[in-house]
Amino acid sequence: MNKAQLELLLNQLYSCSLAIYDAIEKDDLNEINALIKQKSKLMKVLDTNKKFMSESFSLFDVMVEKIKEQENKNLQCLKEKRNVFYTKYKNTLKTAKILNKYAPYRAPQGSIIDTTE
C-alpha cells in the first residue's frame, strides 16, 4: 500500500465516520448498521496493511486525529440520544404504574352464593 492509497483509506474512514454521525442524528438504525459494517471492513484493511507501512503513519497523524475527534463526537451524540430515550422510558414507566394503580377494579363474573336450592 502506498501513501496515496493510505490517504484515500483514511479519507474513506473519515467520511464513513461523518456519515455515521448524520445517521445517528436521523435515528436511522439500518443506515448506522450498514455504515458500521463498511467501517469495519475499512478498519480491517487498515490493520492488515499497517504493519507494512509503520513509518508512513506518522505522516498522517493529522488525519488520524481528525478521525478520532469525529469518533468521540459520535460517541457523545450516542450518549445524548441514550439519555433522551432513557428519560422517555422512565416517564413511560411512571405513567404505566399510575394507570395500573388507578385502573378500575373489575369484579369477577359470576355469583358467590348458590341460589339453585
Image: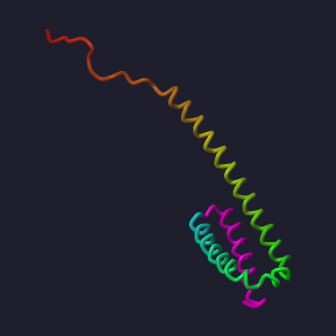
Percent of width and height locating residue 70: 77, 68
Report the magenta stretch's main SS: helix
Q: Is residue 41 above or below residue 73?
A: below
Which region is colored magenta? 1-28
Q: Residue at x 85, y 80 (%)?
A: 58
14 part of magenta stretch: yes
Q: Residue at x 67, y 51 (%)?
A: 82
103 sits to left or right of 92: left
Q: Quadrant of the N terminus?
A: bottom right
Q: Is residue 8 above or below residue 84?
A: below
Q: Residue at x 26, y 17 (%)?
A: 111
114 part of magenta stretch: no
Front residue of 103/86: it is 86
Front residue of 56/17: it is 56
Q: Is residue 75 above or below residue 106?
A: below
27 sits to left or right of 66: left
Front residue of 46/17: it is 46
